Amino acid sequence: MIHILGIRHHGPGSARNVAAFLESVKPDIVLVEGPPEADPLLQWVNHSELKPPVAILVYQPDNPQQSSFYPFAEFSPEWQAIAYARRNNIPVRFMDLPMGHQIGVWKEMKEQQEPPPAAADPSVNNNAFRNNEVVEAVAFRKDPISYLAEAAGYEDGEKWWEHMFEHRQDNEQVFEAVTEAMQVLRDTYPGKEDRIEQLREAWMRKTIRQAEKEMFQNIAVICGAWHAPALVSMPKQKEDNDLLKGLPKVKVECTWIPWTFSRLSYFSGYGAGIGSPGWYDHIWHFPKDDGTRWMAKVAQLFRTKQMDTSVAHVIEAVRLAESLASMRNLYKAGLEELNEAARTVLCNGENILMQLIHDELIVSNRIGEVPVEIPKPPLQLDIEKIQKKLRLPATADWKDYTLDLRKENDLERSIFLHRLQLLEIEWGERQDVSGKGTFKELWRLQWNPELSINIIEKGNWGNTVGEAAEKFVIDKASKADSLSTVTSLLENTIPAELHQAVEVCIQCINNLAAASGDVIQLMEVVPGLVQATRYGSVRKTDADLVLGIVNSMLTRICVSLPAACIAVSDDAAQKLLGLFFKLNDAVNVLQQSDITRQWQQTLQAITAAGNTTPVIAGYATRLLADYKLLEGDALVRVFHFAMSSATEPDKAAAWLEGFLKGSGTILLIDNDLWGLVNNWVGTLDEETFTRVLPLLRRTFAGFSSPERKKLGEKVKGGGGGGISVKRVAESGIQEERAKQGIPVILQLLGIKS
């Protein structure tokens, strides 16, 4: 006898019905919708270390990006069916169209420029979570349950299914009812079928016939509800054989991987996903809960967040949920009623607290576990081994690690994470860390199931993380055609302690630098190289190779830079100014007397040239003042010449902007310079002052708030000789009329008079 059990994927009600049905009919074989290539993996179900949520990953070894996930939770009907078969030592098989054929058919249709089939989309194939490489533009098909929900007067198919099946205790003949409803839908919407859908159902029927041929008498078939009618009323065997004849096929491999509740939800893009996996897990374990246990979980969550929540709050919330269910003619409160009660009683109407409940409880951040003995690619095994050794568990939520590189274990963690980052396996994100020094790093880690595909893909480069990262970097550096690309690669390679890759990167930088005559490009990469050398002492890395190329590049910069500062446009001058700033910091970090002396001589050549762009000349003068090579009367003379009435106001303002870049403190401590600036402003006529005002504003906007405040007080106090006061007195301004505008100005500034 054949029992067709049409189910909804990841529904605790369906899972409970399946488990009860199998216990009652006691089949001698179980057939489950899923990829037949994964049959060998079913032996691991009920293993003590295989803890759902988990997923079967099916992928092409030569193109891992073409892959599919088949997720399972404990409340998935398929999982319960497989677990039943394993407990009772009866055969269990997957019966869907093999993924090797599905990918082959899809490729064939793509080559023939046919529109991609709807069933190739995860939103249609309710048992697969396909990668975007497998599915591109896809036709949309409505969830058939939504039609039934609309007919029953529900706007939400999820809510209808929950009240009809998840909360219902008496489910006698439920599978016959589901099959009948789906048959009506298939008859009403006959245009929903496509080629892959037809092939899948033909293969399912073929698998059932094969089981009958093997003399199994009591066959249980667990499939998506939509497919149930097609398996109840079978066409002739020849029709299916003709349909399946000559199917293209590609080679695929399978493995178990950890999954997460967040990826089980449809918010992640999973077509067969559910809106509330955490809630479904709760009602799977506590089907008779009237809401009390759930509200207790909410209260417990709030208490962990230091929010007081009393027992009285929980009682009142449960009562409100029950009242809402009664008003809506529901037999018990569902998630919607519990949410409304929690928002009203526990959250005081705050949506942000409801978002916390949604993320932590309704969806949840649970992650499954997979035994290490399960066959996996060598690179994945090495990563898991290192994770265990360094105590870096894979978690579904973000977890922060502050690493002290002076500690051996933290240093090894840093090296491991940097190597994964180089391999573009984005498990961790590097964060900015407060404090000085290079011995601290902050990483935020979150494991996503999709990383398994990246690991398989990168396994072509090596069997260990170190080997794969080194080969990957060397290949990338050898193919790079720009200094900035290789320099960025080198910055990330040094902390990963890949010495051979470092040498290759340095060699590539040396070759590219020798072929480059662009001083701007050299200035862009030197600060990054200097930053990379800072890891030398902490990571026991020989930084001499990097320093050698840095010194060579700095020498070339010093020779070519003065000529590059002549006749520069305003936009280019601003970019060059930023490069000057970073390059000067890099020279100071190196603290090498020869390099510092070359840099200072270059600055003197730039300031001495009469045709240097004013903003660059001003900044070079400021740097010489900071180095104490230009101070006292000599500095005042240079400043006076640049700001004299003989200099065009626009050029003088630009020179002043460069001189004051980054800090205005020098104007606070040097009254002579302050007086020169104050006098220069006093000599400008109204039209000229209006023209240079934007430059002055940009200059002073770069100062810190305390500096601007002190400069304002200095102006108010008449610091600098009072020439501006004299100009006001001679300007003929009507003071009485001016005073009348003061209250309005104060009001605009928000200052009480």
Image: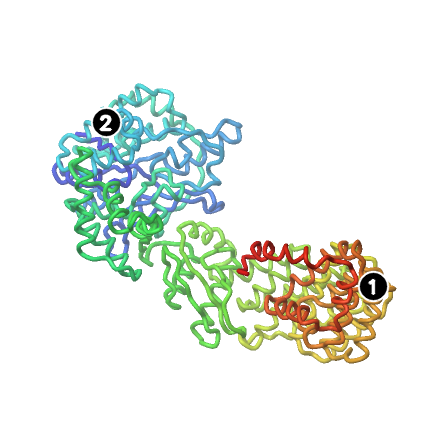
Q: Nearer the viewer, mark 1 or mark 2?
A: 1
Q: How would you rate the neighbour count of disc 1 (Cα within 10 Å): few for under 14, some for 14-19, many for 20 or more?
A: many
Does the CB distance between marks 1 and 2 fall below 8 Å? no
Residue 305 located left or right of residue 504:
left
**Does residue 51 sit above or below 537 in this rendering?**
above
Q: Secondary structure at mark 1?
A: loop
Quadrant of the image occupied by residue 409: bottom left
User: How many numbered discs, if any?
Assistant: 2
Q: Looking at the image, which is closer to me, 691 or 597? A: 691
Q: Residue at x 24, y 55 (%)?
A: 299
Q: Residue at x 37, y 24 (%)?
A: 192
Q: Residue at x 83, y 61 (%)?
A: 566
| Image quadrant containing the N terminus | top left
Q: Is residue 472 visible?
A: yes
Residue 479 located left or right of residue 150:
right
Residue 471 located left or right of residue 261:
right
Q: Looking at the image, which is closer to me, 312 or 617? A: 312
Q: Position of residue 290 (x, y in %)?
A: 16, 45
Q: Please report whichever mark, 1 or 2, sits nearer to the chain's N-terminal start.
A: 2
Q: Residue at x 12, y 35 (%)?
A: 170
Q: Which residue is mark 2?
A: 179
Residue 404 located left or right of residue 21:
right
Q: Which residue is mark 1?
A: 612
Q: Position of residue 474 (x, y in %)?
A: 60, 60
Report the Cα–Cα distance between label 1 and label 2: 84 Å
Q: Secondary structure at mark 2?
A: helix
Type of amino acid at the residue the image marks with label 1:
Thr
Q: How would you rate the neighbour count of disc 2 (Cα within 10 Å): few for under 14, some for 14-19, many for 20 or more?
A: many
